[in-house]
Image (tube, rainbow, N blue to C red):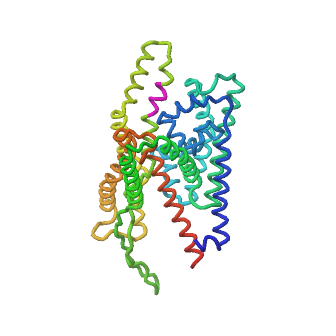
Amino acid sequence: MKLIITDETLRNRILFVLGALVVFRLLAAIPIPGVDLAALQGFLENQFVGLLNVFSGGGFSNLSIMMIGVAPFITASIIMQLVSVISPRLKAMYQEEGDSGRMRFTQYSRYLTVPLAFIQAFGFLLLLRQNDTIPTLDFLHTLANVVVIAAGAILLMWIGELITEFGVGNGISLLIFAGIVAALPNAVSALIFSFDVAQLPTYIAFAAAAIAVTAGVVFITEAERPIPVTYARRVRGMKVMGGISTYLPLRVNQAGVMPIIFALSILLFPQMIGAFLARSAVPFVASAATAVTNLLANQWVYGILYFGMVFVFTYFYTAITFEPHQVAKNLQKNGAFIPGVRPGGTTSEYLGNIITRITLVGALFLGILAVLPIILQGVTGITAVSIGGTALLIAVSVVLDVVKKVDAQTSIREY
């Protein structure tokens, strides 16, 4: 802490982050015109909109000009990751070309963010109009709102990039974290005003569970399986190189929060379509849409589907981000090997078996974490607060990342 205060460069980086977050929160308080706040509060109870509010940094809760937040950029990043699976060129750019390749990959994601911002802005304005949250507008007013909302998303992406470059930590993650933290006062006030002395033991148990869940999130996020690696001894001229032993860290939760985002996007998409089609003039379409919406509104059905999709997508995203064949190839190219395992195909198979086993733990963890709020709210009946979910995972990951970046900066200054 003393070094943070005395070191001018590190202090300026932290102040830049704080200033950028203040600007973001000020912009997130500017609403678009013609909002029905009563209808908005009811609409925000939808879990899909609740997720969007997390990724907008709380900007959707008052339909601000930042209402879609970094959602277009996150969507663009997901699309680019999926396309890289079927495109050898993008795959090589992201995995084999180093930092320059990743920078170009990210630049393509930024380009894709622009049209997605306009599409999402129009789509959510249409959804809000369907739910009578905003009035019906003429073409020019609708176009103006779409342009303003899309510009807000692009501006927020730029602010996030500035934080990454001139601040500490990942800018996009910090913006989402700021929205999560900004929602805490409302959650605490709702808990205080709904406080019931008769349920005091329940609240105490709830607080203990919150601490336990947070500790579990930290443990699983930081957990890794070290694979011993030895570099072969090589003689070049009069120099002896290699002969050292190190380890290859395989994280238990390789996929991070992405499986939850994938699962929610697919699971809640039918609910959004059902909201459109429920008002259809065709009786069969309207009744089918209502039946699907009511089925997904069942907490048990929703929880089972949610858990299953998170579990499957954890394996899917891990397979995208970690390729045992490529890792084995890189180890062999650098003269490294795993003791007791033949280089090449045998090493690839060995790493694949290990990542499959440890991903099982990560998949179960993410699945339980995703449905934990549903379980606790169903058992306790307390809806003012919830434990677990995407917000907690993001918050813990961001805090750990920032702490590591600050420690790295301070270590550089000390040495």
Front in this rendered view, residue 389 or 239: 389
Q: Is residue 412 visible?
A: yes
Q: Position of residue 157 (x, y in %)?
A: 62, 47
In the image, residue 116 above or below residue 337: above
Secondary structure of the magenta portion, mostly? helix
Front in this rendered view, residue 330 or 153: 153
Residue drawn at point x = 40 percent, y = 71 percent: 335
Front in this rendered view, residue 154 or 299: 299
In the image, residue 352 above or below residue 375: below
Q: Quadrant of the N terminus?
A: bottom right
Residue drawn at point x = 50 percent, y = 40 percent: 51
Q: In this view, which residue lies farthest toward the front? A: 197
- Residue 112 lies left or right of residue 340; in this view the side is right
Q: Position of residue 62 (x, y in %)?
A: 61, 37
Q: How many marks?
A: 0
Q: Position of residue 344 (x, y in %)?
A: 34, 62
Magenta residues?
268-274
Q: Quadrant of residue 382?
A: top left
Q: Quadrant of the C terminus?
A: bottom right
Q: Is residue 314 visible?
A: no
Residue drawn at point x = 43 percent, y = 45 percent: 386
Q: Position of residue 16 (x, y in %)?
A: 67, 59
- Residue 412 lies left or right of residue 320; in this view the side is right
Is-magenta flag for residue 384? no
Is-magenta flag for residue 271? yes
Q: In this view, which residue lies farthest toward the bottom? A: 238
